[in-house]
Image (cartoon, rainbow, N blue to C red):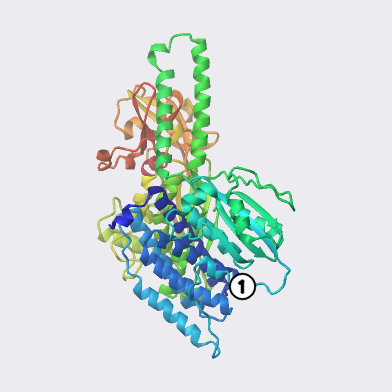
Amino acid sequence: MSDDFNNYSEPMLEMFIFETNQSMEQLEEILLNIEGNSKITDDDINEIFRIMHTIKGSSSMMMFNNISKLTHSLEDLFYFIREKEIYDIDLTKLSDLVFSTIDFITLEISKIEQGNEPDGDAGELTDEIKDFLNSLKKELPEGEVVSLENKEEPENFISKEYTSENYNKYIGKIFFEEDCKMENMRAFSLLRDLEDLISDVSYKPEDLFEDEDAAEKIIKDGFNILFKSEKDYEDIFNILNNGMFVKLVELEEIDSSEVIDDKMNEKEKDDKDKIAKNIKNPFSLNKSKNIISVNVEKMDVLMDLVGEIVITESMVTKNPEIQDLELENFDKAARQLRKLNNELQDIVMSIRMIQIGPTFHKMHRIVRDMNKQLDKDTRLEISGEETEVDKNIIDTLGEPLMHLIRNSLDHGIESAEERIEKGKPERGLIALDAVNTGGDVIISIKDDGKGLDKDMILEKASKNNLLSKSPEEMSDKEIFSLILLPGFSTKDDVSEYSGRGVGMDVVKKSIDKVGGNIQIESQKDVGTTINIKIPLTLAIIDGMKISVGDSIFTVPTTTIKESFKAKDEDLVKDTSGKEMILIRGEVYPVVRLHEIFNLDANEMNLKDGILVMVETEESSYCLFADEILGEQQVVVKPIPFYLRQYKVKDSGVAGCAILGNADISLILDISGISNKYI
């Protein structure tokens, strides 16, 4: 990589990556709205122009020239569209160009995040944009010209002069939030926000891009600006005060006869910490934006430390050496420590929780592109986007959701002709939903397509030797789950979205990784629903400890309905000989933990041990153990890598935890046990 690239400070580079990624998401949303409404508005044009202009400036400053040149060409295009007020335009072509730009920039940012140089060639795409711009120019009446030269510099893009004397003069000083980075770009962004409202602009630092010390000067002395405007004080102040990362605005209206340069020099001598005095309107000039961005790796470290504190607290308070002692003051201090630990956990957890909405909305782009590629008409309906999930789980969900959406559109949704023949609406529907059920989040992907063909699935599974029992013994749920096996595919033809040897097993592995599970429901010619159940967080859970012989298991308390001792008269067996228990008129299966884990139990008779009723999304059943040891918060540790080859998770183990006495407890996967043994 180049020396220039390596010389950037990490915070500055992180800020560039963060803001560019945000801009790409915002840009994608604007484009999808444009296509959905089949029209482009002034606001759309201005916002796209602003985004391109900002990225062009920041990437140029970071010396990522390929990004800068590409965004410059797109900025020229939207500048022309804006200035000539062109609305009758080929929106499909325009959207394709901007989407291609988004894809290119996203790929280059990904390279930067991985520590590589952004070396992609955007030459062909840049030429396409220029050709499209030239085609628009040719459609103009003869003699109409829009100059694109030098529009990017602040001195030039604010060029209009007022013809009347009905204007005000203002002098201002703006300070930005500490550590917001790229203060010169923040200042330039403010100028962009004001460009249509002000004239005769002077500001210091004078060169926001070429001057390497511009950002430091703004940190030290603020961004000083002097200008004319027909707008009143309140309008100007609000625009400045609402700028991104603006901390303090000092704005003063001055007499039109005052000498501009003298006033600017006088302003520079002001102490940056003073509160500005407004001679016309007593606005509050301090605006608190108590928001900071934190590297997620630091949050992971913090979460790990909280987990270690929970383990250590348990080791201290549950220490066998003090269990039989009456220590009133110690117990009081231990309760206070537990209270503070719980509060610390809650705060750290809340910081890590983010809404699933942005991940969902990214799927609009997938549907849009596939509709175009496959010549289908499908809409994506989103609900539950405000549901919050742990940041690490959100990061893992993107790829599986993308694959499932593609799968629904490619395999499930029929062509318009097929749908009409079946009496369905011509336009297909994919519904994406999330709901919080307590300790878990259920994400469902539902389509109104042709559904899964059980016979085809069984035929394919049999051909590939994937059947573990005869088809007659398999439930619909078991048949549909076969598509989650490695290498399984019901798609015979190869398209851009299928036939690459990558199937639903990739989705299953990703969901397994975050402790989730997948359930599939389908009805032929009605549609398919895929439910993904994932924990809210991977870190700390409340658990109930139960013992089986010398082993201790932890059952997540969110899955427990009740616990009780069995009575002889309530014990029954079904027609296949499986043990069941009758409770309040309902029968529930019994799972003996010592049998499924091949352990020596202390209690073999059901009425001598303890039964713990647990529930999953589909059913409830009872776990049989020796005894209940009590509740305890535990830190969830993943199954060690060397044990994964033995498919421990498939046996009903979700993870492990370190107990107060330093013993290891296996955390039970209640859904996994249900799927395998019920």
Number of numbered discs on residues: 1
Q: Report the quarter where the C terminus lies.
A: top left
Q: Which residue is located at x 58 percent, y 69 percent?
A: 158
Q: Which residue is located at x 43 percent, y 76 percent?
A: 129
Q: Position of residue 328 (x, y in %)?
A: 52, 10
Q: Residue furthest bottom?
A: 142
Question: For residue 134, what is the image quadrant?
Answer: bottom left
Binning the other alpha carbons within 10 Å of mark 1 as few (below 14), some (14 to 19) or many (20 upward) gives few
Q: Residue furthest top?
A: 326
Q: Report the quarter where the N terminus lies.
A: bottom left
Question: For residue 476, what is the image quadrant?
Answer: bottom left
- 142 up-or-down from 324: above or below: below
Q: Position of residue 316 (x, y in %)?
A: 41, 19
Task: Depth check: give the residue in front, 33 or 456.
Answer: 33
Residue that numbered label 1 is attached to = 160
- 472 up-or-down from 149: above or below: above
Q: Position of residue 305 (x, y in %)?
A: 41, 32
Under mark 1, the amino acid is Lys
Q: Is residue 32 visible?
A: no
On screen, residue 137 versus residue 504, left or right, reads right
